[in-house]
Amino acid sequence: MKLIEKRVVLHFTGFEPLDGVAHRARYERSARQSAAVWGYSLETGAPEAGSDPLSFVVTTGERVAEVAPAAADKAAPVAAAKAAPVAADKAAAGEGTGSPGWQTKSRIHMVDHDTLVSRLRSGNTLSQIMAGFRGCAEIMLEGGMRGYFRHAWRFGLFFLFPFLLTALAIALTAQIAIMPYGLAFSPWHMLWSGPLALCFFIFAFLPFSERFHTLHLFADWVMAVALGRMDRTDFNDWLEDRAAAVRKALDEEADEYVISSHSMGSSVAAHVIGILLEREPEIFQGKRVMFATLGSAILQCALMSSATLLRARVGLIARCPEISWLDVQCLTDSINFYKVPVVAVSGHADAPQAKVILIRVKQMLTREHYRKIRKDQLRVHRQYVLGPDLQAPFDFTLLTSGPMPASVFASSDEKRMPG
């Protein structure tokens, strides 16, 4: 197996209030963790001036070094060329053999959508709540919620949670406001119960709800509707702009092209890559391309009845012969469609299906670290793109900057290394 010397990565980030600079900083921190765990050298370059999307170069190479203490109970120290992931049931014992002296240069393009996130969060609290409930109603009316519970009931609960929580708070606020009426007091008592109800909602519920990122989730569902319906000019123009930027990035010669996406970023990626395939069906001819969706939320949008364009673009990607689709899913992540074939459910049962690999967050983290985060579903959902404590069958840094072709992550062979 030929090691990768040069790679181009287009990473479509998840729905987070982070711009490209912040995503690069997180990538650098995670990459340092990966390098320490697997025992390879790594250098993350500064952002390239004027790059849009923000881009930077990551250089990895072999280094004979001790593995970080956190990884000592998982495997003996290895160089990164020996660090391609092993099969899940052999992760604790697997070792490979690699070629000495390797060096891999990866240019990472962070295709973030912070502009859209900021726009959705720019209104006052009341307008954000109203927009969120409107989005909830639209998803219900278009069959989205029915699809969530049919294919991934935990995702259905994730959808309902922020709306049920806020609806309960609104009901309690109303009860406080009309308390004098229930107690047969004079209507003049509403002069104190009304302000008290307002204080409860503003100073008690809203701070409490931020622990669950409620308003942020409201905005996430508004964006899901926009990407499903494709009826907002600002969103559509932004997607066209990103398609032009990605097209330019693909002009660079490389051994491999990795198009990775996390969460909501997978719907953005499907639209952007679909736009390019619509215009240039042969755009990837002669290229080795891996489309890796991590904790994908494509079906969050695609299950809406109006999402015909998104579903069509999913089919274009699946049928592109140069693209290998890898769908990374996790049982303990409730914010993904676990064991659901995204291509078939999007209406393309006759197309080549994405290769599904199942990972376990608890294999990537120490017992103490996992115990600390396991009840925070949004934090568990982010682990796809974060650094590991231990050697495990999946590592985002190795997928995007490691020496092995990204296709090794889809292999069922536990000896995934070259001889």
Image (tube, grey):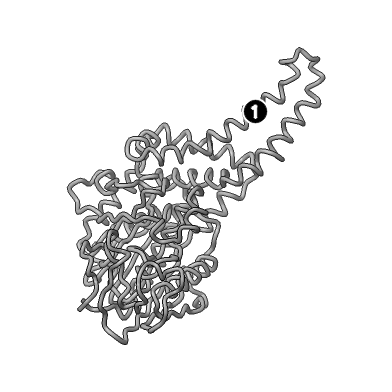
Toward which corner of the image does residue 191 lie, by quadrant?
Answer: top right
Q: How many discs mark residues in the rendered view?
A: 1
User: At x 45% / y 56%, what residue is drawn?
Assistant: 237
Crowding near the residue tagged with mark 1, few <14, some 14–19, many ≥20 C-alpha atoms within 10 Å: some
The residue closer to the viewer here, 376 or 401, is 376
Q: Nearer the viewer, residue 405 or 118?
A: 405
Q: Position of residue 264 (x, y in %)?
A: 43, 52
Q: From the image, which quarter does the C terminus lie in?
A: bottom left
Outermost left residue: 350
Q: Residue at x 43, y 79 (%)?
A: 42
Q: Looking at the picture, how far across and down is residue 410, in whole percent?
A: 25, 62
- Which residue extends farthest bottom? 101
Q: Is residue 362 left or right of residue 177?
A: left
**The disc labelled 1 sits on which kind of residue?**
Leu
Nearest the camera: 52 or 22? 22
Residue 280, by quadrant, is bottom left
Residue nearer the viewer, 145 or 377: 377
**Residue 55 appears in the figure:** no
Q: Secondary structure at mark 1?
A: helix
Q: Which residue is mark 1?
A: 172
Q: Quadrant of residue 251?
A: bottom left
As drawn, the residue found furthest toward the top would be 184
Residue 82, above or below 261: below
Residue at 62% x, 32% y: name it.
169
Q: Residue at x 29, y 52 (%)?
A: 314
Whether residue 328 is visible, yes or no, is yes
Residue 5 in the image: x percent, y percent? Answer: 31, 81
